[in-house]
Image (cartoon, rainbow, N blue to C red):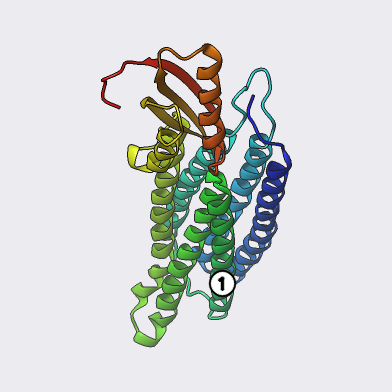
Amino acid sequence: MIHNDRHPYRKRKNLLRRAAWGGIVSNLFLSLVKGVAGYLGNSKALIADAFHSASDVISSVVVLVGINAASKPPDHDHPYGHGKAEMVAAIIVSVLLGVVGIELIIHSGFAFTEPPEVPSGWVIYIILFSILVKEILFQVKNRIGGRMHSQALIADAWHHRSDALSSIAVLAGVGTALMAGTLQMGWLVYADPAAGILIAGMILKMAWDIGYEAVHKTLDHTLHKEDTETMRKKVIEIDGVKSIDSFRAREHGHYIIVDIKISVLADLSVEEGHAISKKVKDELLKIENIEDVLVHVNPYEKGAEP
């Protein structure tokens, strides 16, 4: 069974849930404001940005479900816990981002076939407000996700950052379109839908990056040797451990599970060998994020290289 009481996990779950709910409420408000402003202010790019914010609502809900599932204690069918539920949530978020990106390309592309409309100047204030809110959400969620080792919340944070960047593109597109009359260059009006297509490209890139990372970690990603040096050093310093024959530290969502084979003197009793393996397990469990350790003991041949 996986060690540790559930109190740290309740605290982690509550913190992540508050962050997810904050994103849901904020995105609902922003998507409504940007959608109405885009419609009344004749801005195709702002309408596209409203769809982006609406997709953030869905992704935050998915993240919330993933956090709840990942926080469940181990059971008979899942003896290693449910940590990978957050990875699954991150993958779903990346797929949703991809769908939104494709839809925005189509939506903005149609604008080039319609008579151009100059957006209203006041929509710029809505865009600036959106950029501020989105950047705050990114900073908060990314910091909490990093501290709690939540790939799902980090993915959701970058979803907010992509929305902030897309709003900057919208700002540039709307600003350029507003200059069309001043500069007597009517074609600049199309900068607004062009910004919408640029936003879509940014979203698709973000979807790929998030999905790739989540899939990589879902497939039992093992930490590289340089990432486990501290762990190995702690083990080899334990009295009775003659060598480390095998060491695998695999990520299981927000925590790590270690499989290790050590060698002890062959003439030790079973009880003595077990005591050494218990010291190894206890020492590794002191390291943050290591949730379970499986220790296998081999007989050590004198004269062999440690």
Does residue 239 appear to the left or right of 2 in the view shown?
left
Please state the horizontal and vertical placement of residue 281, each as a whole percent of the image. 54, 30
* Total number of numbered discs in the rendering: 1
Please state the horizontal and vertical placement of residue 88, each as a whole percent of the image. 54, 35
Outermost residue on the bottom side: it is: 182
- Amino acid at dot 1: Leu
Q: Is 1 located above or below residue 65 in the figure? A: above
Work out which quarter of the rendered image holds the N terminus and state it.
top right
Q: Is 52 located above or below residue 298 in the figure? A: below
From the viewer's side, name the closer residue of 24 and 242: 242
Does residue 67 appear to the left or right of 190 in the view shown?
right
Crowd rating for badge 1 (residues with CA inside 10 Å; few <14, some 14–19, many 20+): few
Q: Is residue 50 visible?
A: yes
Work out which quarter of the rendered image holds the C terminus and state it.
top left
Write the residue at 68% across / 58% down: 22
Outermost residue on the front side: it is: 267
Write the residue at 35% across / 85% down: 183
Write the residue at 40% across / 58% down: 197
Please state the horizontal and vertical placement of residue 177, each as a whole percent of the image. 42, 75
Write the residue at 64% across / 31% down: 3
Q: Is 43 located above or below residue 234 in the figure? A: below
Q: Is residue 113 visible?
A: no
Snapshot quadrant of residue 144: bottom right
Please state the horizontal and vertical placement of residue 46, each as a whole percent of the image. 53, 65
Label 1 sits on a secondary structure element that is helix
Query: Pointer 1: what residue?
Result: 132
Snapshot quadrant of residue 36: bottom right
Q: Is 263 located above or below residue 190 in the figure? A: above
Snapshot quadrant of residue 66: top right
